[in-house]
Image (spheres, coloured by chain):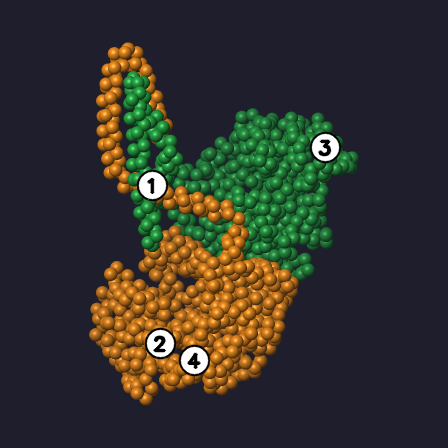
Chain colours: A green, B orange
Amino acid sequence: MASILRFRKLCYVEPVKCSSLGFESFETPKIEKKDDEGAVKAVESTVGEKQKKKSSKRQPREWRCMDYCCLTVGYMCTAWWLLLFLYHCLPAALPGFQVPEAPGARLRREGLTALHPVVLVPGIVTGGLELWEGRPCSEGLFRKRLWGGSFTEIFKRPLCWLEHLTLHNKTGLDPPGIRVRAVPGLVAADYFAPGYFVWAVLIENLARIGYEGKNLYMAAYDWRLSFQNTEIRDQALSRLKSKIELMFVTNGNKKVVVVPHSMGVIYFFHFLKWVESPPPMGGGGGQGWCAKHIKVIMNIGPAFLGVPKAVSNIFSAEGKDVAFVRSMAPGVLDSEILGLQTLEHVMRVCRTWDSIISLIPKGGETIWGNLDWSPEEGYNCDLAKKRYAQPSLLDSNDTNSDGKMEFQIKESVRYGRIISFGKATSQLPSSQLPNLGSKDFLRTSNPTKFNSLCSEVWTEYDEMSRDGIRKIAENKAYTARTFLDLLRFVAPKMMQRAEAQFSHGIADNLDDPKYAHYKYWSNPLEAKLPDAPDMEIYCLYGVGLPTERSYVYKLSPTDRCKSIPFRIDSSAEGSDGGCLKGGVYFVDGDESVPVLSAGFMCAKGWKGRTRFNPSGIATYIREYRHKPPASLFEGRGLESGAHVDIMGNVALIEDVLRVAAGATGAEMGGDRIYSDIMRMSDRINLRL
Amino acid sequence: MALLRRRKASEAEKAQHSGSKSDKEIERTDEENDKNISNRKKAKKAKFEGKKKWSCVDSCCWFIGCICTVWWILLFLYNTMPASIPQYVTEAITGPLPDPPGVKLRKEGLTAKHPVVFVPGIVTGGLELWEGHQCAEGLFRKRLWGGSFGEVYKRPLCWVEHMSLNNETGLDPSGIRVRPVSGLVAADYFAPGYFVWAVLIANLARIGYEEKTMYMAAYDWRLAFQNTEVRDQTLSRIKSNIELMVATNGGKKAVIIPHSMGVLYFLHFMKWVEAPAPMGGGGGSDWCAKHIKAVMNIGGPLLGAPKAVPGLLSAEAKDIAAARAMAPGFLDNDLFRVQTLQHVMRMTRTWDSTMSMIPKGGDTIWGDLDWSPEESYVPRKRKQRDNDSQTAEQNDTDTLDSQKKGINYGRIISFGKDVAEAPSSEIERIDFKGAVKGNNVANITSCDVWTEYHDMGIEGIKAVAEYKVYTAGSLLDLLHFVAPKMMARGDAHFSYGIADNLDDPKYEHYKYWSNPLETKLPNAPDMEIYSMYGVGIPTERAYVYALSPYAECYIPFQIDTSADGGKEDSCLKDGVYSIDGDETVPVLSAGFMCAKGWRGKTRFNPSGIQTYIREYDHAPPATFLEGRGTQSGAHVDIMGNFALIEDIIRVAAGATGEDLGGDRVYSDIFKWSDKINLPL
């Protein structure tokens, strides 16, 4: 204490001393100057305190600078503290600023209470990952989050961080000596980063009607792994099964409401098949497990049939966002100044994550369209926006969708061409395409080691010949089916690993015994729903946001080592209000998942009693029209329809709460549709 | 700022240039300038004086700025510093550190085998808010207990309100839901930097443990054990999790590691899980045999802890008593109307779990007025750090002659030091049980704090003090008299006696399940039970009480801090008689069951489960760089004791008690146990 006091005294004395010192020292040169010739001196002396100061400050100058610095820092700090203090003293609710009531509080007043236990299944990327064992470079990070949270380690030790998040590129499991595991519990995905909620708002509202740790469970899993591998490595599926059984028993035999989000939807779909399959491969719950334990599955932003975004991600580690950045500031991402090669690194890491493969569009050309045709072809981006701006036409979606059919056919976009090289190609009629036959290039080119100069191989592109790359570009356009061939050619090892885990086709005969293999379990087009006639399935998703659907690519100019040979052609722009922007064709959706993928299964594939839904489980579609936040105070919006922000959508939360408190789909009002999903689904010619 | 000045200067320069065209003007300006200069000087001085007025605020800000910048720079340096530097520094000072046990044992080839379950003790588990009153706005899912305890300072009354339970049911008050934090985070650190389980977890992780093979059985430690099942289904969750872990780890049985009160909690669990369904878990009579390999009790107060008594009686313990002796008046004044102790007492008295730690077994175990098992105890000379503590060192207890008369440890509470030391024949005791509780209840309205003492009145309090001496047996009567409501609640959940006939059907009730003297161990002959605890630290055992100077809102009793043994190494200090133990739990309570009660095939242990005692002699950290020490024996710090961690890891990796070397005893536990006359 005494030493602190003394130090303080010292500090108090010093500034005074130093200022007097400064004063004296600029006194002396002035006197000298006076002896000099008058006029100039006069000029000078009047001119400049400045110069005087400059000359005088020669010795104590740094001192002064420090002083000012400290002074300003001090002012800033005190001001900051004062503001902070005021902010904390502020009553939570200012008179002028009204916080809208949380849906949970409102529903509680209506008398809703916790009834069914709730299981939350997070999607890709949103779940936290923490380190359990690592290389020496990760010293001190034991049980700290590598993914989620503040991400500080990316800046501190980027390469170390990447190394630890990478999986083994043969097995798709842990590399030797590294164990990165999913964070368990509600904290796993309540906030992705500080202040950026994912599940937190929903959890808080559930808590208002009486939910707590014993009837609310976050099924966190390592989202990098393929679904079956989460069971092999972490027994994640077994844990989920045990937790659901436990909650079912301890809550008075009330069935569980499952709320998966994004990729969690197909993860849970995988679980449904796994849990009823016999033990070595499955969970051995027996027929009827789902019927006994599950009341509802409320899929939020479901990626049932995959997302086109995954295509560009795997193909060139790009998405809309990256492409935009590139068009805005060319050179930033391409620069090699710091030897960063960000994209290449990202690609190397992402390609070891099997789970991304699960998001590749499923169902091939039947669902996603071929070179000439696509289910969304009548869609007009501009019109769509206008239509959504009028909330009055809310329910009568049949009439207004009919009304605008006529005048867009002319320049309809060929969404079926998921990847096309060059803008022109994406618009040509298929007859003019130099169609080599998609499989041709697979046979002709025998990849010779081209980049032998590059010391280490990062991506499989490095093992490809220039010839092969050019051939790919010459084939011009790829549909959802031929894209898989393309990937097999471009990244044979990755696809070999991944295709042991996932399948992307459509089953002809679902009773074929081969469909008992787990690789088909996450594809709704190759697996039957469980025999649970009382269960309900909801598809809840946002609409009204432009969502990536297909891409215009080009060959990337550079030839250097480790570069990615393809990139999105961000110069490709459509006419005003067109669907093409920055090399990406857009369609209706929630910014990540197009309506087609999210809604088709509920709208058609499972509707009624189909071969995919033999027991006739009821399905409901609940769409939420996107409305950007009205004011700054709303944060990410109370009526957002965006893929993650929808978790804060008041209407969606209310729906989830009502179902959790016991409501059925019919009581909620059945379907609520704003988009063209019904018409699109009708156009898809899938045998049911 | 500087920029501004420069601009001004250049403007002035221009003006001067235009002005200096004619010579006359020059001269004139010259004079003017001279004037100017002098003026300016004056102005300068004035300015400077003006500045001086400012200088206080200025220098304040300057000072804050300095500190902030220095702080940031240090912080920056600290963050950029390679992580290994502190270790180098430590090694430079203390010599090379031993490998942490996890690393050492990994080199020996040990790997994760049996799943591990942690059962945290009282107080160490975190609690978070799920629903609260208006005042707790914004604390949803924030920790009320554990973590930084920031809310205690910000809104103390609100905090106390939310931490209290309903004083009739012992469950949630209406409108408040405070729930245990789940997962390993529940009790890895109690407060930032204050580890509880973290060191053990980190070392287990080194040999391959991770979330799927480790489970923290967090429960709400405020509730009575059975109530955790009633309210949260905690026992069911633990059962289900153990079953899951055993199933997913290829049928390998679990190793359970309870700490402190967790030991009693798990004892309760073992009875619960095999009991039939409505009251129990319905696991069947061989559940423990099938699922549990070993129970490794750390610092378990199996027979209760005397510390719980002053906690219940006067919300005091050694720490507070010491504080009171140092700064009398500080804790007693109600200058700020704070009345800390009363608030604490009101809150803790709603926590049923504290009653599970009242000494059990009565006079048979804890001694009566004249006799106690530890009577010949002499505090050992503090040993120097001995790193090879494997060799059980001989206790030179033949210095018995130094202690002429033994201390009457059996008198857990005595009013006055003289009473504590007098032979029993000289004590006059007036039975208090019939005493009328006074009707002259001092105006309660002025006290905003509720404790049951207000119902007692002065006569009641006097009667209590006149009974003079309380042993473990009569202590219960005292508590019943002093706090009838609390004890009524507690009696429904806990029992403190010794069973005559364990087959009596009444012992199927859950209130007996956490008392090792009233239950049988499960039928699991392959199971092992360890008692691991620290020794070598003076531990509270008996108290000298005094009536507090009476004022209506005070707690009427307090520890008589003036009572001191006189000699330097006396057992009586500040009104507390202490004995060997781990600072919280005396050796007798932690070790007796494993040393005698359960050893071999006894009526408490019909299937002959193997028991082992592993004592860890306390050695304080050599330098402050060691933190809380790697050889500590203190109640919580022992969780960082390398020897203990090594034992646990070996057992988790498959070793048996024999492989560890059987018992390891430093204290007199076997001698004391022999003196206890308990039919087995």
Q: Which residue is mark 3?
A: A466
Instruction: Check whether the beta carbons of the residues at disc 4 and disc 2 lie within 8 A of each other.
Output: no
| Vertical arrangement, residue B304 with respect to residue A61, above or below | below
Chain bearing tag 2 is B
Tell me the kind of residue under disc 3. Answer: Arg
In the image, residue B592 lies at what x, y percent?
49, 79
Q: Nearer the viewer, mark 1 or mark 3?
A: 1
In the image, residue B206 lies at what x, y percent?
59, 59
Q: Which residue is mark 4?
A: B377
> Mark 2 packing: few (<14 Cα in 10 Å), some, or many (20+)?
few
Chain bearing tag 3 is A
**Residues indicated by labels 4 and 2 sit on the same polypeptide chain:** yes
> Mark 4 packing: few (<14 Cα in 10 Å), some, or many (20+)?
some
**Residues indicated by labels 1 and 4 sit on the same polypeptide chain:** yes
Report the residue at 46% width, 83% height from top: B398
> Mark 3 packing: few (<14 Cα in 10 Å), some, or many (20+)?
some
**Residues indicated by labels 3 and 2 sit on the same polypeptide chain:** no
Q: Nearer the viewer, mark 2 or mark 1?
A: 2
Ranked by sequence position, the earlier of labels 1 and 4 is 1
Ranked by sequence position, the earlier of labels 2 and 1 is 1
Tell me the kind of residue under disc 2. Answer: Lys
Instruction: Check whether the beta carbons of the residues at disc 1 and disc 3 lie within 8 A of each other.
Output: no
Q: Which residue is mark 2?
A: B567
Where residue B62 is drawn, which disc sits there?
1
How many discs mark residues in the rendered view?
4
Residue with the most extreme top position = B22
Tell me the kind of residue under disc 4. Answer: Tyr
In the image, residue A470 lies at what x, y percent?
71, 31
User: Mark 2 and mark 1: span between their CA atoms?
Assistant: 54 Å
| Vertical arrangement, residue B259 with respect to residue B81, above or below | below
Q: Nearer the viewer, residue B506 or B665?
A: B665
